[in-house]
Amino acid sequence: MNAQQTLFRAAAVATLIAAALFSGCAQTPKPLTPISANDPEMKALDADRARYREKKVALIEKALNLNAKEHDAFWREYYPYEAELKKVYDERYSIIRDYAANYENMNDEIADNLALRSLKIRDDRNELFRKYYGRIKKSTSALIAGQFLQIENELNLLSDLKISTETPILPRDVSPTSVMKK
């Protein structure tokens, strides 16, 4: 094999490796509008989240009724969970923001971007539930981990319902809601 063939083969292998590495990147669309750290909406959202977390912690404390040993083990796992969940909800906020920003100019490309990102955050959230169910079960018990999962699921369903009922359906010439109003 001469130098030119070796170079061609190396370039082909590099291309295949790059394609394999980056093929997963194309599957999850990126946000349409970037969010800055100084975004006033994000600051207000963070303040609302802090108040919500305080109430959520109190609710979990009351619902689980943990003894001292269980308490320490549970909260040692819970706070990292909450930090990871915040990242998932940051992406959900980004999707909602992109939806609002692009509502009047909605097209197939934007709708697909929003739908794929929405599906991914559902997967991410379920994977997070699965991960922390296992961690909490290991550090406390299956019963406590199950109760945690039940509480989280109920709170997330309520949150999803609130967002869903306040979000207009994707615009189109004829939508089920516009037909129902006539």
Image (cartoon, helix red, strand yellow):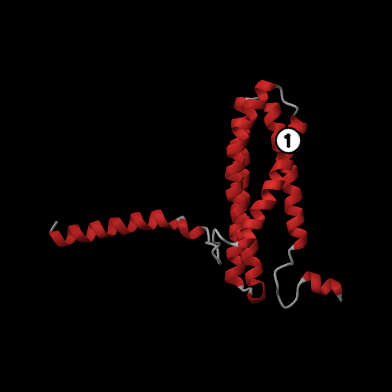
On the image, the x and y values in percent for residue 75 come to 63, 31
Quarter of the rendering occupied by the N terminus:
bottom left
Q: Residue at x 76, y 54 (%)?
A: 161
Give, as a three-letter code, the residue at label 1: Ile
On the image, the x and y values in percent for residue 137 come to 63, 28
Q: Is residue 141 visible?
A: no
Q: Residue furthest left?
A: 2
Q: Residue at x 59, y 55 (%)?
A: 91
Viewer-side residue, 1 vs 67: 67
Q: Residue furthest bottom?
A: 173
Q: Work out whether 86 lies above or below 150.
A: below
Q: Is residue 125 visible?
A: yes
Q: Residue at x 76, y 55 (%)?
A: 162
Q: Is residue 153 left or right of residue 92?
A: right
On the image, the x and y values in percent for residue 140 come to 64, 25
Q: Is residue 14 left or right of residue 182?
A: left
Q: Work out whether 50 lies above or below 65.
A: below
Q: Which residue is mark 1?
A: 60
On the image, the x and y values in percent for residue 13 come to 29, 55
The answer to which quarter of the image holds residue 42 is: bottom right
Q: Work out whether 155 lies above or below 161.
A: above
Viewer-side residue, 59 vs 23: 59
Q: Work out whether 118 lies above or below 64.
A: below
Q: Residue furthest right?
A: 182
